[in-house]
Image (spheres, rainbow, N blue to C red):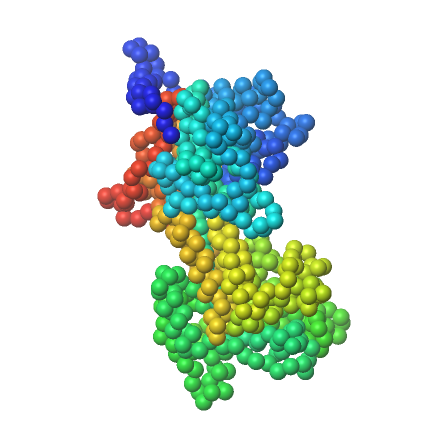
């Protein structure tokens, strides 16, 4: 809320800005300061500060962290915070993150230096988590407020929050309640203190009252601006993930190096082929390597033409494109066994434009070492000299080529640079095959493959394999060998139940695994437990600025179509939480490869100290090594300066424009010009009105034909 006198203060600020910008007769105008685009983080080791650091890291925003627990840490004083460059005052940090409003001892010279710095250069400060009290513009919770758990509570973005830093949200900010027996979220919700200039951005109902208490708000005092956060969180909790963009946007005034979006792509593996079914009696999958030879009979799960029609209708109704990762040989095998006809392939090909298509090899062989499946677990076959026997370069290259030719005959639109091998084979798989198949890279070269899928659960970091870069994919815990809900729950119970409850007991010994309290109900367990859990995990990836795709299997779109409830939940929850200005970004594999590549290159350059970024007045300048693309987020209307003329920068997202950009022709740096308005003002903090987003994004300016794109292929 705003207190009386605020309007007068704004008018006074405008007059002061004019006075600062207009030198007195005979006096030279003072040069505007240089503000380095880097965030100072004062870290006490708590989860809230770590969460903000994770957000900066993920977006590629440069920051300097001061660990308060280190005896040999730098001292925060005037020299540490600012200096002069070429006769121009320089602020070394555009913003400050503190673990609370004052993490230093009483009378600290370091806090005094920060206060003076923030006043001088209009530097905003985020209090990552602090108590509600008058020192931060809030009344004590005891005076009609609340201190306690917020598990399962529904906070809301206020009108000021929507007009300001949290305009990308629809309004609701639900707090997680994943374990009823554990308190996950603690907060101090309070009303603004009497007389305080405090604007609440996110609030929650106060128990026993019709009033609401602030959880996130802006406190303006003594020529300074603080974003006051009064609930504790960690980087993985949904409530933080929802607010993280706005916190960093407020912190940087939407002028920052780094960019973040919400990504969701779903690959459907084994399309046209069939997947073997889980056997609830044998607790393995006959026909696959987890069942001893001779045990059970293989039972194939394969989509039908009706399943294909449903997939196309679903995709259109959700406005969401699936990536069909296909094996053309699966269709040919089906036709051999069914009088030369394959209604599934006919339907999928008829709807080919509804999907993206990705090569999964012709008939899905294992392309790593030659497997010895005479025992469970399988092992790598050996050559006479004892060395590992690998699948040949010729066979790998042939599998890639033959599937391309099949796609060409079927008229499928294919990007030849993309490949997903069966089971991500050819890449290392522990413990049996600790190294990549040495024939894989050359076979990729033979076929000009530059984007190769990998399993994120085994191989998270992007890496080079021959001419290709990997694209790690998240496996969704919807099993490849399950077409029916009963299959999924029986296998789920086997894996995640204790041996005393009839399960495998693997969860009692395996790292990073959790046992079920009791086996899931065969009828209700999927809808009540698996769907909420898997959708929450996937949505967590979406909200973490993570472009890695998720993958399921064609079997999950067949029979009971068990994948759809999870996908529906992710899409529905997202649309409920986010405004239209922040749509899901659904990239194809090659573009994810490029995004991960550019992030890694950028991160390396920043870590090596080879990036310089600063703002002087309305101009942002970034110098980076030649060929390194720069991620940036700027106010709508920002323009990129070229050798001759300018062009619009970035593409709209969440109320700003953002994108990757490199130095132009004959230029050694990136130069951006900010639009006129509050975001480009440079003066003392008490003379700047907070940036408000009260208008829609600016359209493409007249005469400009193209925007600088966010992503890039290649």
Q: Position of residue 264 (x, y in %)?
A: 45, 56
**Looking at the image, which residue is at 39% across and 79% down?**
346
**Looking at the image, which residue is at 63% across and 64% down?**
519
Considering only vertical position in the picture, is 155 above or below 330?
A: above
Which quadrant is the C terminus positioned in? bottom left
- Does residue 696 show up? yes
Left of 23 or right of it: where is 621? right
Q: Residue furthest left?
A: 702
Q: Position of residue 643 (x, y in %)?
A: 34, 38
Q: Position of residue 504 (x, y in %)?
A: 69, 67
As rendered, which of 320 and 465 lies closer to the eye? Answer: 320
- Does residue 448 show up? no
**Looking at the image, which residue is at 64% across and 74% down?**
284
Image quadrant in which you'd find residue 159: top left
Q: Position of residue 376 (x, y in %)?
A: 71, 73
Left of 568 or right of it: where is 465? right
**Looking at the image, which residue is at 47% across and 70% down?**
561
Q: What is the tally of numbered marks visible in this picture?
A: 0
As rendered, which of 248 and 566 lies closer to the eye? Answer: 566
């Amino acid at each position: 809320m705003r207190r009386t006198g605020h309007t007068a203060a704004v008018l006074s600020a405008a007059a002061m800005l004019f006075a600062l910008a207009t030198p007195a007769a005979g006096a030279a105008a003072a040069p505007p300061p240089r503000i380095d685009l880097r965030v100072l983080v004062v870290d006490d080791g708590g989860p809230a500060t770590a969460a903000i650091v994770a957000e900066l890291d993920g977006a590629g925003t440069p920051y300097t962290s001061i660990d308060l627990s280190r005896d040999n840490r730098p001292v925060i004083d005037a020299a540490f915070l600012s200096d002069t460059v070429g006769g121009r005052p320089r602020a070394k940090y555009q913003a400050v993150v503190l673990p609370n409003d004052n993490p230093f001892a009483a009378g600290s010279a370091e806090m005094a230096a920060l206060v003076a710095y923030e006043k001088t250069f209009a530097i905003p400060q985020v209090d990552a988590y602090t108590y509600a009290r008058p020192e931060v513009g809030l009344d004590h919770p005891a005076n009609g407020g609340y201190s306690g758990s917020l598990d399962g509570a529904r906070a809301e973005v206020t009108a000021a929050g929507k007009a300001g830093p949290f305009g990308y949200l629809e309004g609701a900010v639900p707090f997680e309640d994943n374990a009823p027996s554990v308190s996950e979220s603690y907060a101090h919700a309070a009303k603004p203190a009497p007389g305080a200039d405090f604007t609440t951005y996110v609030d929650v109902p106060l128990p026993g009252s019709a009033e609401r208490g602030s959880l996130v708000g802006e406190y303006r005092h003594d020529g300074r601006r603080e974003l006051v956060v009064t609930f504790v969180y960690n980087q993985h909790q949904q409530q933080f993930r929802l607010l993280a963009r706005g916190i960093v946007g407020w912190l940087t005034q939407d002028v920052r190096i780094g960019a973040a979006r919400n990504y969701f792509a779903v690959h459907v593996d084994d399309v046209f082929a069939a997947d073997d079914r889980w056997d609830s009696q044998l607790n393995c999958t006959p026909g696959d390597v987890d069942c001893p030879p001779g045990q059970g009979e293989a039972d194939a799960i394969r989509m039908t033409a009706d399943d294909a029609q449903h997939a196309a209708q679903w995709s259109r109704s959700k406005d969401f494109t699936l990536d069909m990762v296909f094996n053309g040989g699966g269709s040919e095998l089906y036709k051999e066994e069914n009088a030369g006809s394959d209604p599934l392939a006919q339907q999928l090909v008829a709807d080919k434009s509804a999907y993206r298509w990705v090569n999964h090899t012709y008939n899905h062989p294992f392309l790593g070492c030659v497997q010895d499946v005479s025992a469970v677990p399988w092992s790598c076959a050996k050559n006479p000299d004892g060395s590992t026997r690998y699948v040949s370069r010729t066979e790998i290259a042939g599998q890639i080529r033959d599937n391309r030719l099949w796609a060409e005959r079927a008229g499928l639109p294919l990007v030849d640079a993309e490949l997903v091998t069966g089971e991500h084979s050819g890449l290392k798989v522990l413990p049996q095959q600790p190294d990549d198949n040495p024939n894989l890279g050359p076979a990729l070269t033979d076929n000009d493959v530059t984007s190769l899928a990998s399993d994120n659960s085994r191989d998270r970091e992007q890496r080079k394999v021959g001419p290709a870069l990997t694209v790690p994919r998240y496996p969704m815990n919807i099993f490849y060998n399950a077409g029916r809900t009963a299959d999924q729950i029986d296998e789920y119970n086997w894996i995640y139940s204790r041996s005393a409850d009839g399960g495998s007991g693997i969860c009692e010994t395996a790292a990073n695994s959790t046992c079920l309290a009791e086996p899931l109900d065969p009828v209700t367990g999927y809808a009540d437990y698996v769907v909420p859990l898997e959708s929450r995990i996937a949505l967590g990836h979406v909200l973490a600025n993570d472009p890695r795709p998720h993958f399921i299997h064609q079997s999950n779109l067949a029979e009971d179509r068990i994948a759809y409830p999870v996908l529906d939940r992710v899409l529905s929850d997202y649309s409920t939480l986010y405004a239209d200005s922040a749509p899901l970004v659904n990239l194809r594999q090659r573009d994810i490869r490029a995004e991960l590549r550019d992030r890694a290159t950028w991160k390396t350059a920043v870590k090596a100290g080879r990036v310089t970024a600063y703002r002087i007045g309305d101009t942002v300048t970034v110098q980076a090594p030649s060929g390194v693309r720069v991620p940036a987020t700027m106010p709508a209307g920002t323009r990129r300066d070229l050798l001759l003329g300018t062009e619009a920068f970035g593409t709209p997202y969440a109320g700003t424009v953002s994108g990757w950009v490199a130095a132009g022709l004959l230029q050694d740096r990136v130069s951006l010009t900010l639009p006129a308005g509050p975001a480009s003002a440079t003066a003392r903090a008490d003379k700047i009105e907070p940036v408000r987003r009260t208008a829609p994004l600016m359209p493409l300016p007249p005469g400009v034909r193209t925007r600088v794109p966010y992503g890039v292929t290649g």
